[in-house]
């Protein structure tokens, strides 16, 4: 078996162990915390009998390890329980709300790469001169500002004072949403061939995606800058200069690829930050995503829904890190070459 | 690892105007927070009662940041918000840093199954985005100050475990550790007297950076309505409450929002300066 695949499978194994740990942790938090979940679910007006019936139905009277066993058994059947708030299976709820959140996170991730990496290259190229200072100042301010602060600032400036973008929502109310295929509004619009809806959805996406992305853009720019500078000090870059290669070619061909490795590694972590910060940005822009659902169920102490939402987010994060690991080992010649040698 | 002697670190820090600017911002915010009752113009506006004659007043010489819906001076409340945020940040780090550091020392030095259990446990905690974990803990607890603090503490220690673990792994092979082992020093002696001092620069740097980030996390929680409850002046809930009155009373939101930015920026610039000065990997 190729070594790369073997390493990858080992990582998958570790991730599954971690996910198992996450399920114990979040299940433990949900069960140890004070308050009777059945009583909370039914409200103060329910009779003691009703509460007792629900406790029985949800195995709440059994010892905690048995409860966990039931939980895992249902989980393996793809069942995350029933939300007491929406009265629907948690998986149905997540399937409905997750695509909107992911659409926002993906759009931000795209902005992070498309704007962050060039900004980093630019500041590294002009190290110590004014584009560097300006770029670094912008990055550090972007990193230090919570996503919801960017949200309200952007909303105030570009939706209220200078109304170029919509204040909130995912689609104008006059627009008819496309038939749901993937749940991603933009993708569904393309599939339905409905260009006005697509344009409208993208138009609604700009401010929230930017608010969410700014901190990550700053982070990416800072990281790209520092790894580029490190690589500029390497002898082979000096050699390329001595050979008379243009600065542009050195920056984009020879220094960029190795500089990308640490950036890529951190992208996985940044993705987690984006998922979490989506909670804040969705709140500002009234975005109908998983985060809004998450806050709603947390405020209502909806046990199964909370556990399900957190598990899904953790799983997404682990999957994302696996993909990043794989990309890094493909892009890193040392790992790739080591594998080739081992294979021959 | 501190690659530079202390005097060189100080020199590097001093010659960097950006780090000094960060230090100035931090000093300003911290001093204002400590002396809040004396430096703010309307210290009584901390509670639920304001000046009903001046409701929703725009920023002016009398009220620098304007007043809120019940006539409380926003500048005053922002400074008291700093006081609350900084106190919480210090308490959160005072609990989570020692836990994280000790676990990191033990995992890095002892190795074996102890290492495996501790490091997988940190992986578990780090696999959930911090805000989401803190939110779910808050979901099961009443939204009080102490609980918000506990929720943030519970998710903060693993970062220090991972940081210290990496330092220890590098240091454990150094000659001085070997020498101590040969002489027969006890494990606690080696951990706390020999290795720990070398963890100080990166840990201190991370603490400086983290004060800003804990403030940000607490503000995020209360922005979602899961943290501090009114009438306690809190930056996050001020932003959330003010957002309802956009765009007419924009100062209700924008000034608390900008003050979070200033505070976090200060600690970040200071932390970055320390990182460069100590040449520490954080």
Image (cartoon, coloured by chain):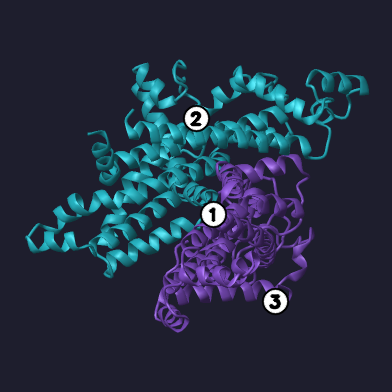
Q: Quadrant of the N terminus of chain A?
A: top left
Nearest to the observer: residue B189 or residue A279: B189
Q: Farthest residue to the left: give it.
A: A244
Image height check: is A22 above or below A162?
A: above
Residue at the spot 33% in from the left edge and 64% down from the top edge: A134
Image height check: is A164 above or below A5?
A: below
- In this figure, which residue is indicated by the disc labeled 3? B35
Q: Secondary structure at mark 2?
A: helix
Give the label on residue A100, or none: 2
Label 3: how many residues lie within 10 Å, few (<14), some (14-19) or many (20+)? few
Which chain does cyan denote in the image?
A
Which chain does purple denote in the image?
B
Marks 1/2 in contact by CB < 8 Å: the verdict is no
The quadrant where residue A64 appears:
top right
Q: Secondary structure at mark 1?
A: helix
Residue at the spot 61% in from the left edge and 45% down from the top edge: B117
- In the image, A46: left or right of B227? right
Label 2: how many residues lie within 10 Å, few (<14), some (14-19) or many (20+)? many
Q: Chain of mark 1?
A: B
Give the label on residue B162, or none: 1
Residue at the spot 92% in from the left edge and 23% down from the top edge: A48
The quadrant where residue A34 appears:
top right
The quadrant where residue A103 appears:
top left
Residue at the spot 65% in from the left edge and 66% down from the top edge: B188
């Amino acid at each position: 078996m190729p070594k790369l695949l073997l390493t990858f499978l080992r990582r998958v194994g570790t991730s599954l162990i971690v996910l198992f740990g996450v399920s114990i942790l979040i299940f433990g938090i949900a069960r140890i915390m004070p308050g009777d979940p059945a009583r909370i679910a039914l409200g103060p007006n329910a009779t003691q009998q009703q509460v007792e019936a629900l406790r029985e139905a949800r195995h709440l009277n059994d010892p905690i390890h048995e409860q966990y066993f039931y939980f895992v058994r249902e989980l393996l059947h793809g069942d995350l329980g029933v939300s007491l708030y929406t009265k629907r299976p948690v998986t149905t709820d997540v399937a409905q709300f997750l695509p909107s959140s992911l659409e926002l996170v993906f759009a931000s991730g795209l902005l992070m790469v498309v704007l962050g990496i060039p900004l980093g290259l630019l500041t590294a190229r002009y190290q110590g001169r004014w584009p560097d200072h300006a770029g670094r100042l912008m990055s550090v301010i972007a990193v230090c500002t919570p996503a919801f602060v960017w949200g309200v600032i952007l909303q105030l400036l570009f939706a209220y004072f200078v109304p170029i973008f919509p204040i909130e929502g995912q689609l104008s109310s006059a627009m008819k949403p496309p038939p749901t295929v993937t749940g991603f509004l933009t993708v569904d619009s393309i599939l339905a061939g409905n260009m006005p809806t697509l344009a409208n959805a993208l138009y609604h996406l700009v401010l929230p995606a930017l608010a969410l992305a700014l901190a990550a853009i700053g982070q990416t720019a800072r990281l790209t800058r520092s790894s580029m500078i490190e690589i500029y000090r390497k002898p082979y870059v000096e050699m390329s200069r001595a050979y008379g290669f243009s600065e542009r070619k050195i920056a984009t061909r020879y220094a960029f690829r190795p500089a990308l490795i640490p950036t890529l590694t951190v992208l996985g972590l940044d993705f987690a930050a984006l998922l979490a910060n989506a909670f804040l940005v969705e709140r500002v822009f009234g975005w109908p995503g998983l985060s809004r659902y998450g806050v709603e169920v947390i405020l209502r102490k909806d046990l199964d829904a909370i556990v399900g939402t957190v598990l899904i987010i953790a799983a997404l994060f682990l999957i994302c890190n696996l993909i990043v690991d794989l990309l890094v080992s493909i892009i890193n010649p040392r790992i790739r070459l080591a594998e080739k040698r081992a294979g021959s | 690892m501190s690659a530079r002697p202390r005097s060189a670190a100080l020199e590097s820090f001093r010659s960097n105007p950006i780090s000094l600017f960060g230090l100035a911002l931090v000093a300003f915010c911290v001093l204002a927070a400590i002396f809040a009752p004396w430096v703010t113009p309307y210290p009584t506006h901390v509670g639920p009662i304001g000046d009903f004659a001046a409701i929703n007043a725009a920023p002016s010489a009398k009220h620098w940041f304007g007043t809120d819906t019940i006539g409380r001076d926003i500048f005053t409340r922002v400074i008291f918000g700093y006081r609350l945020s900084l106190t919480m940040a210090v308490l959160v780090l005072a609990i989570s840093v020692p836990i994280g550091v000790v676990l990191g020392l033990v995992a890095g030095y002892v190795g074996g199954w102890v290492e495996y259990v501790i490091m997988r446990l940190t992986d578990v905690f780090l696999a959930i985005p911090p805000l989401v974990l803190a939110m779910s803990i808050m979901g099961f607890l009443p939204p009080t100050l102490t609980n918000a603090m506990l929720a943030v503490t519970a998710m903060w220690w693993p970062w220090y475990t991972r940081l210290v673990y990496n330092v220890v792994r590098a240091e454990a092979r150094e000659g001085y550790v070997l020498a101590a082992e040969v002489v027969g020093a006890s494990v606690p002696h080696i951990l706390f007297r020999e290795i720990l001092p070398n963890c100080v620069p990166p840990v201190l740097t991370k603490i400086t950076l983290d004060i800003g980030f804990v403030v940000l996390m607490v503000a995020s929680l209360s922005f979602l309505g899961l943290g501090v409850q009114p009438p306690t002046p809190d930056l996050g809930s001020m932003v959330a409450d003010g957002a309802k009155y956009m765009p007419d009373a924009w100062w209700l939101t924008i000034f608390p929002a900008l003050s979070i930015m200033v505070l976090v920026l200060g600690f970040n610039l200071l932390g970055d300066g320390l990182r460069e000065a100590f040449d520490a990997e954080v």
